[in-house]
Amino acid sequence: MMAMTILDPFCGATRIATMKPGRHFLHIPGPSNVPDRVLRAIDRPTIDHRGPEFRALGREVLTGLRRVFKTAHPVVIFPASGTGAWEAALCNTLSPGDRVLFFDCGFFSGKWEGVAEQLGLRPERIEGDWRAPIRIDALAQRLADDPMKEIRAVAVVHNETSTGVTHPVARVRQALDKAAHPALLMVDAVSSLGSIDYRHDEWSVDVAIAASQKGLMLPPGLSFNALSPKALEARTRAKCPRAYWDWGPQLEANEEGFFPYTPSTNLLYGLREALAMLEEEGLAAVFARHTRLATGARAAFEAWGLEFYGTDPDSRSSVVTAFVMPEGFDGDTLRKTVLERYDLSLGGGLGRLRGRVVRLGHLGSLNEMMLAGALAGIELGLGDLGIPMKASGVAAAVAALRTALAPAHA
């Protein structure tokens, strides 16, 4: 609802009305909605982080995270955003001057590459089309052109929220294995963990990066590294400076459920509750729900006649749908319109996509009714701005969701 000037009958003066009834529709690709159960869990007194009650909490969340990552190996927690976990992955396993191979597949892959450069590593980029999956053939060729095995790590973003494209981590591992290349495999699973199927051990990922504010349904503030034995062995040789980000003190303290410095206790309360919610629903059901909601969202954009940014239908993300604004219309104007008039937050285009792309997040604690409300807000905004629509996207989404839900209701 836009602010408006009204006459206040109680004082006879004019004032600006800013009250927004109802609830805010948060549909950016993260942070995602924080469910009430998690909010209530966070809203507890902080306890002694060296006492027995905390020991039990620490052990519980560290064990639960392993189940979500699908790993039998350690997961460490840092009070940070995903950017901190990017740095931890690099500085614990590599040395200055080491070559790291990145894929040019979106805004966040580029940001991670920038962190590597700042750490004194030598990032190298496989060029690509942001609208398509990463090129496994180009990776295979680059590995073949590295007979001295100078590439120490290959880094890939599993799900690029800037583009709405999901990338094939398992095929990256297959290419490394086929080339018998010893490079570490690092995966940014920030927006995929808890939303899209991620298999740390099965895909032989060495270091995964994740954060609390996406599929784990928490506020920002926690980041994670899932590790492999190979990554832990690489740490013994790595010479990048590290202090706060060092896995060693973390792993030692974690043995007893503790941390080497003051942890984010109340966020850990929330993490325990979020992990319980994921287990109650079941990870397979969580992934199926995200797929179902993505199907509904895509049906809406197809009905409106809007172009998807991702050109490969099989690689479009289950957590975010990115669409291209029609010629002559600006994405930030649409976002501003739906926020002010309908209290709906959408994600904007990042970097070179600013103004060209708008992103609808549909991840985390989300159901069909919430998605339908967001789509209604977009349809209202498109109409307000005179953006042509072929048909009602909301009606198309409802039909798609009804079909997708039919087996469950049979």
Image (tube, helix red, strand yellow):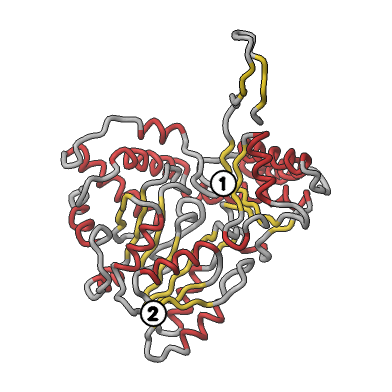
At 47% from the left edge and 68% from the top edge, which residue is drawn? Answer: 156
* Dot 1 alpha-carbon crowd within 10 angstroms: few under 14, some 14 to 19, many 20 or more: many
Check disc 1 and report its element: helix, strand or loop: loop
Number of numbered callouts drawn = 2
At 18% from the left edge and 53% from the top edge, which residue is drawn? Answer: 253
Give the quadrant of residue 335: top right
Image vertical order of residue 124 relative to residue 261, above or below = below
Q: Nearer the viewer, residue 197 or 42?
A: 42
Q: Residue 251, how many percent across, how many down? A: 22, 58
Q: Given contact means CB atoms under 8 Å apart, are the residues at marks 2 and 1 in contact?
A: no
Q: Is residue 386 visible?
A: yes
The amino acid type found where label 2 is placed reads Arg
Q: Which residue was labeled with disc 1?
A: 28
| 246 horizontally vs 218: left or right | left
At 26% from the left edge and 45% from the top edge, which residue is drawn? Answer: 263
The quarter of the picture where the C terminus appears is top right
Image vertical order of residue 366 relative to residue 291, above or below = above
Q: Residue 94, how many percent across, how many down? A: 31, 73
The quarter of the picture where the N terminus appears is top right
In the displayed image of the protein, which residue is found farthest to the left? 51
Image vertical order of residue 63 relative to residue 18, above or below = below
The amino acid type found where label 1 is placed reads Ile
Q: Nearer the viewer, residue 157 or 340?
A: 340
Q: Which residue was labeled with disc 2?
A: 99
Q: Residue 151, how many percent across, how many down? A: 39, 81
